Image (spheres, grey):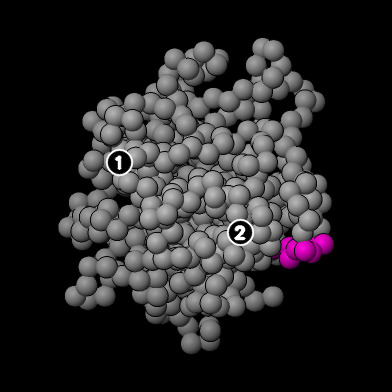
Amino acid sequence: MKHPMIIQGGMGVSVSNYVLANAVAKTGNLGVISGTAMDLVLARRLQQGDPNGDLRAAFDAFPLKEMAERVWNKYFVPGGKADSKPFISRPMPNMNPGKPWLELTVVANFVEVWLAKRGHSNPIGINLLEKIQLPHVPSLFGAMLAGVDYVLMGAGIPRQIPAVLDSLSQLNSTSYRIDVTGAGPGEVYETQFDPKELGEWTTDTLKRPFFLAIVSSTALAQNLLKKCTPPVDGFVIEGPLAGGHNAPPRGGITLDENNEPIYGPKDEVDLPSFAALGAPFWLAGAYGEPEMLNHALENGAQGIQVGTAFAFCNESGIEPTMKAEIIRQCLAGEVEVHTSAVASPTGFPFKIARVKGTLSDIATYKNRTRICDLGYLRTCYKQEDGKIGYRCPAEPVDDYLKKGGSIEDTEGRMCVCNGLMSTVDLGQTRKDGTHEPVLVTAGNDLVKIARYIPEGQTDYTAEDVIAMLTSKLPVSVS
């Protein structure tokens, strides 16, 4: 099979939205939506009133009309809510979710993929984080209902996904093992999702998408090829210069003088050895220039995955005023990207663009009242009574300590969930009138964003990115 040469990365919470993925797909490359927090994204978009009618069109295409209308009627606000009013809440993800959250999650992922696929016949992918386990199965089912073509997953070891895709393609009841801190030897905790409990579907089978695991080593790729049944379909090899979450350095985290993790020769991937595995692969992490695309092709890759370049183009989901200001700072040489070893509650290194007035600002960080009301990065843990509890090192410190967490885990942690929602203009307004501050993540390539901007302009499109990336391709490549 001929795979796309360029994969647009699935970034943030709705940075890689359906508008961006659709625009990239129309160039013949792989547009990818971010599948992170889609339940919340849809609930808040509906409360903003669906001004262009896109959501209504996707809801009308959903195969179970009554389910779609329940979600619509719960969250839709005609004309949109006032900016001064908070978004209403939605159920928190947990081990035993109720039907309203399952329906919201399935519909949300269907809507995003359906809109990304509208108006063309090229493939669309969805990107998920292994660390956010609880929504995986209903999210994938909703995406598959809309005909998603590729599933990409990193931020952990996604061993279960190939079998899950097989099961969901047959509309079978599907389980997913959940990591639980404190679980004893042999104790297994699982979520269970049965599509047929939600309603009577009009089909018995769904297209099974290709699965690309995002990895940082040949050893992990070998493991996923040998121990997954079925094996993964391909890989994205992502280096530590990529935005968002990065794999920790092999051998543990040691910090340099700037408090950034030190990566060394052990973290470099031997491309000839990787190519010898025989699976298709793409290279990622500061690959956003034509010479790097040629380098990837010359080393046996299908192509490259690029995120940061697309994150700040016109079609991305970043709030337009913030986007324009970051581009201005890039052009003025004022932007810095920092790899924090402590910011993310996941414990993974996390890239942060240092922008004044955002959570990267010490004053802004300290003035924010800690709260965990979205719950995506909570860790499941076994309580003394044997029941499952949920805790996050970015929640109020006293709450975390009462749940058995350590004070060290809370130091420097940021509420990535709320911060990333604000980045795409879906941040919460608190009762005191304050707005959740923005958190911007980007790869090290952010400082080079000017190369995508046409002369005489201060903005650029997804098509401009593709044109630049492919501008030096060998004649033999099409």
Work out whether residue 262 can be spotted.
Answer: no
State the residue position of label 1. 84
Q: Which callout, 2 or 1, points at the residue further toward the start of the chain? A: 1
Q: Which quadrant would the N terminus be assigned to in this image?
A: bottom right
**From the viewer's perspective, is 158 left or right of 254?**
right
Position of 457 compared to 13: left or right? Answer: left
User: Secondary structure of the magenta portion, mostly?
Assistant: loop
- Along the line of sight, the residue nearer the viewer: 325 or 182: 325
Front one among 2 and 226: 2
Q: Where is residue 229 in the image (x, y as percent from the top left)?
A: 80, 52
Which residues make up the magenta segment? 202-211
Query: Crowdedness of circle 2 by 10 Å Cα count: few (<14), some, many (20+)?
Result: many
Q: Look at the picture and state if 258 lies above or below 105.
A: above
The correct choice, above or below, for 267 with respect to 29 in the image is above
Q: Tag on residue 110?
A: 2
Label 2 vs label 1: CA separation? 30 Å
Nearest to the observer: residue 149 or residue 152: 149
When asked about the image quadrant of residue 274, the answer is bottom right
Query: What residue is drawn where x is 30% and y is 61%?
Result: 448
Q: Position of residue 359 (x, y in %)?
A: 31, 37
Q: Residue at x 42, y 18 (%)?
A: 397
The question of residue 207 being in magenta is answered with yes
Residue 298 in percent (x, y) is at 53, 73
Say if 112 sits above or below 453 in the image: above
SS under mark 1: loop
The residue lying at 77 percent from left, 64 percent from top is 202
Residue 283 in magenta stretch: no
Callout 2, which amino acid?
Phe
Give residue 291's quadrant in the image.
bottom left
Q: Residue 117 — which label?
A: none
